[in-house]
Amino acid sequence: MNRQRHTAVAVMAGLALATAGCGAPTAQEVSTDGSRFRFEVPVEYGQIEFGIDPLTAQGVAYGTPGTDSADVPSDPVLVMTAGSGGEAASFRSLRELSTGGAFDPLDPGDDVDAGNLQILGYDEIITPEVWGVRLQLALGRAGTDFQALVDRRSDDITVSQLICTQACFNDHLDLIDEVQTSWRLEE
């Protein structure tokens, strides 16, 4: 084999290996209208219809194709909403968003029958640009990872919530955590 042909074969083999090593993307960045927050979800997720009331909240849901909103999904679904009000918000009011404003799941003084609600985890988020809360809850057949973030610059609130059956929730803890911690602010 002549030197020029040998070099061409080596270059082609190197390109093939480089391309195979990089592979296809595994995640994509998503957001909801009115929010500077961006989250990463699996590349196979697409926008789905999932319990977003267009009259009460700007929102969007992402999940695997064919996910039905008539029941608790068996694969994680990310539901995102955005709105104003961060200037008047508190950790308590953000936690209350996790129950639709009905009660604060961490306040034993709230005289509310929470049924079989279990708190699996709670964190407060405090950074120079963002503050908020993150709650992991089990309720009935569902597991949910709820996060409410306040953009300090605009005082807008973005809620991200991953929901699925409790079995799915346990099976996908790593994925759920990756999505919830992937947030970044768009400049």
Image (tube, grey):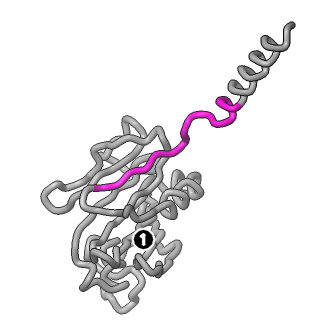
Compared across the picture, whether 41 is left or right of 62 comes to right
Q: Is residue 30 magenta?
A: yes
Q: Position of residue 47 (x, y in %)?
A: 33, 43
Between 71 and 158, the one lying in front of the other is 158
In the picture, the quarter occupied by the C terminus is bottom left
Between 179 and 15, the one lying in front of the other is 15
Secondary structure type for disc 1? loop
Q: Position of residue 49 (x, y in %)?
A: 27, 44
Q: Position of residue 35 (x, y in %)?
A: 30, 62
Is 172 located above or below residue 2 in the figure? below
Q: Give the residues drawn in magenta, as a range.
A: 18-32
Badge 1, how many Cα within 10 Å: few under 14, some, many 20+?
Answer: few
Is 154 located above or below residue 61 in the figure? below
Compared across the picture, whether 49 is left or right of 66 comes to left
Between 176 and 129, the one lying in front of the other is 129
Query: Which residue is found at the position 84% from the left and 14% from the top?
Result: 3
Q: Position of residue 163 (x, y in %)?
A: 42, 56
Is 20 located above or below residue 85 in the figure? above
Between 46 and 10, the one lying in front of the other is 10
Compared across the picture, whether 105 is left or right of 170 comes to left
Q: Is residue 48 magenta?
A: no
Circle 1 is placed at which residue position?
116
Which amino acid type corresponds to the residue marked 1 in the rendered image?
Asn
